[in-house]
Amino acid sequence: MKWATGEYDPNFNYVFNSYYETVGNRVIRTDRGNLSRPTVIEIYRYREYVDDAMTKFLCHEPSAVVKELLILGLNHEEQHRELLLTDIKYILGHNPLFPAYNKNYVSSKVEVNDAGFIKLDEGIYEIGFEGEGFCFDNELNRHKVYLNSFEISPNTVTNAEYTEFIHADGYHDFRHWHAEGWDWVKTNKIESPLYWHLIDGEWQAYTFHGLEPLRLHEPVCHISYFEAYAYASWKGMRLPTEFEWEAAAPKFSWGKAREWTESSYLPYPGFTKAPGAIGEYNGKFMVNQKVLRGASEATSPGHSRITYRNFSRQIYAGNLLA
């Protein structure tokens, strides 16, 4: 097949534009479910067109600028791997039949530290990415922060511990919730973490294996910031800041679920937005967000680093106490 140069179909820019103002008009997020999809044949033709263009493109050494863009794109695609698994679980977990995604799915193991809370002395700590390799712009620039002395748990809150909060009527006690969180609980009639179901007096949870008895020893997962805050308040503790988390992270195991922090998602000192569409990647979202740290079992290996900052409310999210 002989290909023309340029865009395959100018309408695809409109259809596939997620949130980039620089690219042009886009489908409003709430209307995406009404959008007509290309036919299967059209998708295959488009894919063939792209593959052919990429084959020709990669026959020549790309410039340094293009290489940097490709690396960013590949890392962005790895982020979508985590979101894709999250979306698959959400769809299957809301199917009344609770179908399994994969009976052979192997969940990451949980390492428990019995040493008790980790204490860090007050002082100045360096925060942010350093060294060789890729990082996102929101991990820069490395800078110093002053921290008061604090203690932080080396273990995320378990399902067993979280059930105590539920049995103590935590979801019906306004004292532990922010006003916005309390409104969220009442409006949405929240009674437990996402994917939990009380059946015949026993807690069940949807996993990639299907619906099964709640694994009490595993970290609680798929909770909102509101729930993480309320649980910490109920325990008479608090959520760590993202700086406390990063300073203490080398001393404990993490990676089963991302962990909520009390920090707002804000730029680091010296942060600058890149020109063009790339500048919309992180900077435009630095408002009304809380930071998640760590990694989850759905995270791509290269993204499991101490300085990684996430703010998505949709992913595998857990709870750590300070």
Image (tube, rainbow, N blue to C red):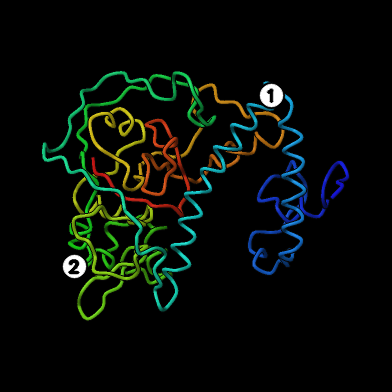
Determine whether, in the image, residue 166 is placed left or right of residue 297: left
Where residue 42 sits: x, y (%)?
76, 61
Amino acid carrying mark 2 in the image: His
Amino acid carrying mark 1 in the image: Val
Where residue 254 sits: x, y (%)?
29, 40
Residue that appears at 27% across and 45% down: 320
Q: Which residue is mark 2?
A: 167
Asked whether 137 or 176 is in front, the reply is 137
Quarter of image, res 15? bottom right
Determine whether, in the image, residue 241 is placed left or right of residue 234: right
In the rendered view, would you say 7 is above or below 62? below
Asked whether 322 or 319 is in front, the reply is 319
Quarter of image, res 35? bottom right
Which circle's residue, 2 or 1, is located before the other in the chain? 1
State the count of labels.
2
Asked whether 283 or 206 is in front, the reply is 206
Q: Which residue is mark 1?
A: 65
Where residue 223 sits: x, y (%)?
35, 56
Residue that appears at 74% across and 50% down: 48
Residue that appears at 44% across and 42% down: 300
Determine whether, in the image, residue 146 is placed left or right of residue 162: right
Determine crowd level at label 1: few under 14, some 14-19, many 20+ residues with C-alpha closer than 10 A: few
Residue most extreme to the front: 1
What secondary structure is found at the residue carrying circle 2? helix
